[in-house]
Image (tube, coloured by chain):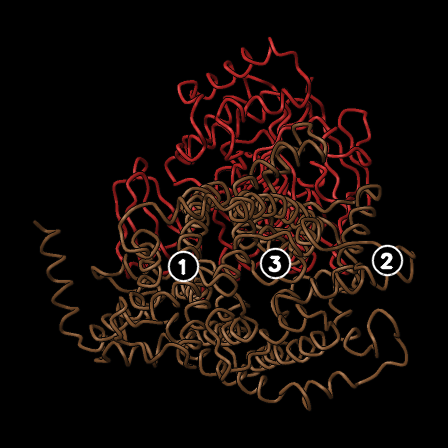
């Protein structure tokens, strides 16, 4: 009884707040149209694409050896990359938390954790080819190996591992710091040595977190389009196969069915990660560390660990540096000196550089405030409000996290090229800048929402309630109380959305029309053609843009942010 | 098995800050010894030095006659109970308790009965298969205790083990700990900031302040004969009065009262007197004052009395000794038993009485 009354009261309260209701309705429409519908149409298409309902399309694609090979390839790469990345990530996290490093090593670690944030997806593949390829600087000119091939399985594994391990490193570092040091001290005073403490206490506590890192990387690896595209050679993964199925074979129904298969794999992983491992991690690591852990003093452990990690870090950093340098070689693979600016010049004079940067920049610039605001509104509703559709909003925006860009791209093609359900409604947006902006928004929404939720959870509900008491409506409360309190998180959401948009490729490459030139698409094109110097020049400028954006944000937060006061608590 | 713990001139530095300024202790075999002091006094620092978790900047630490300065934590043969229990969340109660035995390579056949016995001693044998997150705070505390003593360590260390429990459970658990320690006879070093807990549980107490030991003694010694105003104020409640020390143990209190106290020094001059609330009583003559406030607390009545010079004193009168209740505004005289008070030099704060 009381519960029914409470729900009725909640509903009444909500209906008395028209702004809130409008927002919720608009949100649900947006999420349905641009996340749920494109995925639903994939399902529909793959079952009824050729006129009759049934499994005929699935039968057809599973009969293609290229497709079945792509599945095994993708899973193989994902599995190995997941393991390598989480292990290297764990090593880095362990060294950072348990070893007091000198400033040089500390700086290296910090740089490594920052690089994947600002770098476009191709960078490591490009430099891998330039350093270790057939005409690679290291392989050919230092080691005089003339037939080294970096294309294929190992190329993808190495490049993806180096791309994704910093993410694991950051995740696991957070967990390690949360382990109560007295747990390890307790094991030690009962007679366990350092290694036994690690094996008996630290590792078991980290296990769910490690599984989590493994699966997150697995999903990222499976969804990755750019690296397999450039360095995969003939080793096709699902993402590239789907892309070729559409752009090469013009088999849209087949691509839709393949996309459904890829989506099922990532969704399954995502479900395991989200509902099983995350809960387990929280259960074992609730303690807040009151003091720092016992540092490793033993030089025979400390020195090799630090040196190994520093070398890996140096290697990664070298690969990033290689890109701008590669853009300055007169003829890559043949003539390295004197360094030249001619490629940069050609980018702008011959290859419509300005237009590419303008298009990428403007579209991302429009998309990022929309993304940031949307994700803040979603997280606000999820954390602070109670209403029926809340579960739907939360689930759909989290679902977007598990959807690979390629799948989304195919979904948009199938869903909008002929209008909604092929009726011509909304067909107008297909092929325009608008649909690109929408894709940017949808692709960055999950990350923004996740960080928004964690920022909002830290704000006491009573602060907002007191504003309501004084007569402010929900819009006013959100704009004057909530938003200012999460200003920093909003700002970093803005920049993250911008960086993610301007470096996006997987969904965009399927939807972009010749009227728009996007930098990432250009990089992909030149890398495909083997014009690595031009690709590097484009990539360098992209890195400069993204890095400046992050730098600008940090400066802004430093001088106008609210977080400094909060952090001191 | 159990060891005496001897500490000579322990020094701990954090950069320029000296946390321990040469602390010496002589803890006897099988003794329940408490380090008591306000936060920041260095008690936990000292405990963690004994455990081997903090580096030792100076001094010598002995377990029995074994110098342990250079021995790593896991070879010191200690059991420790942490403030937040530090129970392994991924292991069951049983596995938690068995951990130390396994780490010491105790034969498998012995592990099970010893774990069982330990769990029975702390009365949680029925919880053996549970995971820590299925236990209440008090039960987790018992697991932590069992885990620490089951390895029969030469020294048992406890770092504010009761501070996360509610008041009632705290009283209950301190009796459990005390009885257990008596039964097992393991030398125990206990850290707390709660003076009542320290008095209730310890054989001897070292009261610490700013990295120095202010007084070391049995609970009764420390309560009855505090060696300096800090200890007098920190342990229980004390009233302080300015006075003048004259020849032959004569104490002059503001010209209103003159008493003779037993002294061990020949100091004369300005001094401070401390008296417990229950040692002050209402009398026919003595220090004149006015009752400000009375609080009836069942077994005794607490009065706040304002002396004529404006100073407030706390006086406790036991209800079994009197039926009369003094009302606010009543003029009274206060007196005390000169044998049971302490007098300190005003400057050096050294004790004069014995």
Circle 1 residues within 10 Å: few <14, some 14–19, many ≥20: many
Chain identity for the colour red used in the image:
B
Q: Pick whichever, B261 or B141, lies toward us.
A: B141
Q: Chain of mark 3?
A: B
Q: Position of residue A316 (x, y in %)?
A: 74, 60
Q: Secondary structure at mark 1?
A: strand
Asked if the residue at tag 2 contacts the one at tag 1, i.e. Cβ–Cβ closer than 8 Å, the answer is: no
Q: Is residue B13 left or right of residue A501?
A: right
Q: Is residue A538 left or right of residue B123?
A: right
Tell me the distance, in whole angstroms, between the alpha carbons under discs 1 and 2: 100 Å
Do the dots labelled 1 and 2 sit on one chain? no
Q: Which mark is residue A300?
A: none
A283 up-or-down from A123: above or below: above
Tell me the distance, in whole angstroms, between the alpha carbons under discs 2 and 3: 92 Å
Q: Which mark is residue B288?
A: 1
Q: Closer to the observer: label 2 or label 3? A: 2
Quarter of the picture holding the C terminus of chain B? top right
Residue under pointer 3: B244
Q: Which mark is residue A139?
A: 2
Circle 3 residues within 10 Å: few <14, some 14–19, many ≥20: many
């Amino acid at each position: 009884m009381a519960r029914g009354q409470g729900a009725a009261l909640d509903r009444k309260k909500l209906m008395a707040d028209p702004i809130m209701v409008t927002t919720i309705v608009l949100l649900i429409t947006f999420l349905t149209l641009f996340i749920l519908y494109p995925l639903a149409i994939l399902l529909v298409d793959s079952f009824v694409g050729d006129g009759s309902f049934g499994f005929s399309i699935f039968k057809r694609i599973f009969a293609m050896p290229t497709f079945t090979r792509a599945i095994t390839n993708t899973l193989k790469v994902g599995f190995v990359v997941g393991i390598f990345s989480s292990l290297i990530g764990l090593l880095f996290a362990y060294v950072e938390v348990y070893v007091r490093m000198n400033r040089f090593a500390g700086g290296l670690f910090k740089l490594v954790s920052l690089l994947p944030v600002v770098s476009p997806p191709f960078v490591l593949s490009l430099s891998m080819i330039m350093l270790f390829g057939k005409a690679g600087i290291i392989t050919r000119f230092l080691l005089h190996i003339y037939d080294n091939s970096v294309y294929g399985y190992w190329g993808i594994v190495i490049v993806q591992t180096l791309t994704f391990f910093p993410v694991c490193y950051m995740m696991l570092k957070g967990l390690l710091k949360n382990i109560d040091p007295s747990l390890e001290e307790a094991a030690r005073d009962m007679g366990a040595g350092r290694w036994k403490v690690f094996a008996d206490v630290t590792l078991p506590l980290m296990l769910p977190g490690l599984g989590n890192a493994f699966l997150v990387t697995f999903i990222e690896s499976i969804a990755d389009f750019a690296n397999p595209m450039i360095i995969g050679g003939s080793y096709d993964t699902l993402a590239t196969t789907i892309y070729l199925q559409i752009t090469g074979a013009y088999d849209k129904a087949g691509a839709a069915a393949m996309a459904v298969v890829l989506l099922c794999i990532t969704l399954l992983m995502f479900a395991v990660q989200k509902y099983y491992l995350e809960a387990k991690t929280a259960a074992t690591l609730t303690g807040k560390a009151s003091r720092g852990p016992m540092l490793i003093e033993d030089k025979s452990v400390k020195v090799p660990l630090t040196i190994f990690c520093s070398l890996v870090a140096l290697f990664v950093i070298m690969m990033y540096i290689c890109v701008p340098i590669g853009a300055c070689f007169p003829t890559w693979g043949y003539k390295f000196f004197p360094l030249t600016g001619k490629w940069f010049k050609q980018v702008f004079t011959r290859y419509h550089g300005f237009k590419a940067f303008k298009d990428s920049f403007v579209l991302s610039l429009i998309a990022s405030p929309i993304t940031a605001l949307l994700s803040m509104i979603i997280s606000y509703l999820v954390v602070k409000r109670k209403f029926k559709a809340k579960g739907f909003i939360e689930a759909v925006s989290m679902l977007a996290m598990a959807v690979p860009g390629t799948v989304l791209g195919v979904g948009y093609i199938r869903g909008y090229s002929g209008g909604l359900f092929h009726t011509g409604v909304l067909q107008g947006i297909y092929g325009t800048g608008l649909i690109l902006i929408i894709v940017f928004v949808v692709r960055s929404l999950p990350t923004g929402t996740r960080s928004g939720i964690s920022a909002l959870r830290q704000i006491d509900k009573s602060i907002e309630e007191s504003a309501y008491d004084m007569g402010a409506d929900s819009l006013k409360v959100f704009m004057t109380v909530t938003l200012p309190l999460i200003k920093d998180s909003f700002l970093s959401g803005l920049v993250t959305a911008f960086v993610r948009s301007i470096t996006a490729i997987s969904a965009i490459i399927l939807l972009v029309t010749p009227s728009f030139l996007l930098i990432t698409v250009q990089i992909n094109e030149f890398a495909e053609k083997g014009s690595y110097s031009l690709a590097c020049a484009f990539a360098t400028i992209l890195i400069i843009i993204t890095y400046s954006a992050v730098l600008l944000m940090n400066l802004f937060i430093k001088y106008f942010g609210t977080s400094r006061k909060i952090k001191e608590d | 098995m159990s060891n005496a713990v001897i500490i000579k001139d322990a020094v701990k530095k954090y950069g320029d800050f000296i946390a321990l300024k040469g602390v010496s202790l002589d803890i006897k075999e099988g003794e329940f010894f408490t380090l008591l002091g306000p936060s920041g006094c260095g008690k936990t620092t000292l405990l963690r030095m004994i455990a081997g978790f903090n580096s030792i900047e100076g001094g010598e630490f002995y377990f029995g006659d074994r110098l342990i300065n250079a021995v790593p934590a896991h070879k010191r043969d200690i059991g420790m109970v942490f403030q937040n229990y530090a129970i392994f969340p991924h292991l069951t109660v049983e596995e938690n308790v068995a951990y130390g035995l396994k780490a010491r390579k105790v034969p498998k056949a012995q592990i099970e009965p010893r774990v069982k016995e330990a769990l029975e001693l702390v009365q949680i044998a029925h919880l053996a298969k549970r995971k820590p997150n299925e236990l209440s705070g008090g039960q987790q505390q018992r697991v932590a205790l069992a885990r620490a003593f089951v390895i029969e360590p030469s020294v048992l260390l406890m770092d504010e083990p009761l501070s996360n429990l509610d008041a009632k459970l705290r009283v209950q658990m301190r009796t459990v700990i005390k009885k257990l320690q008596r039964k097992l006879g393991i030398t125990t070093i206990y850290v707390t900031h709660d003076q009542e807990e320290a008095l209730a549980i310890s054989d001897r107490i070292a009261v610490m302040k700013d990295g120095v030991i202010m007084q070391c003694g049995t609970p009764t010694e420390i309560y009855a004969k505090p060696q300096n105003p800090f200890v007098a104020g920190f342990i229980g409640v004390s009233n302080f009065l300015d006075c003048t020390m004259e020849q032959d143990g004569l104490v002059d209190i503001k010209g209103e009262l003159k008493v003779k106290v037993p002294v061990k020094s020949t100091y004369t001059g300005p001094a401070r007197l401390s008296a417990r609330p229950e040692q002050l009583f209402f009398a026919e003559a003595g220090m004149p004052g006015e009752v400000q406030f009375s609080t009836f607390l069942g077994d005794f009545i607490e009065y706040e009395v304002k002396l004529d010079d404006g100073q407030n004193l706390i006086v406790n009168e036991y209800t079994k000794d009197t039926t009369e209740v003094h009302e606010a505004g009543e003029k009274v005289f206060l007196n005390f038993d000169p044998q049971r008070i302490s007098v300190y030099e005003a400057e050096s704060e050294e004790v004069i009485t014995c």
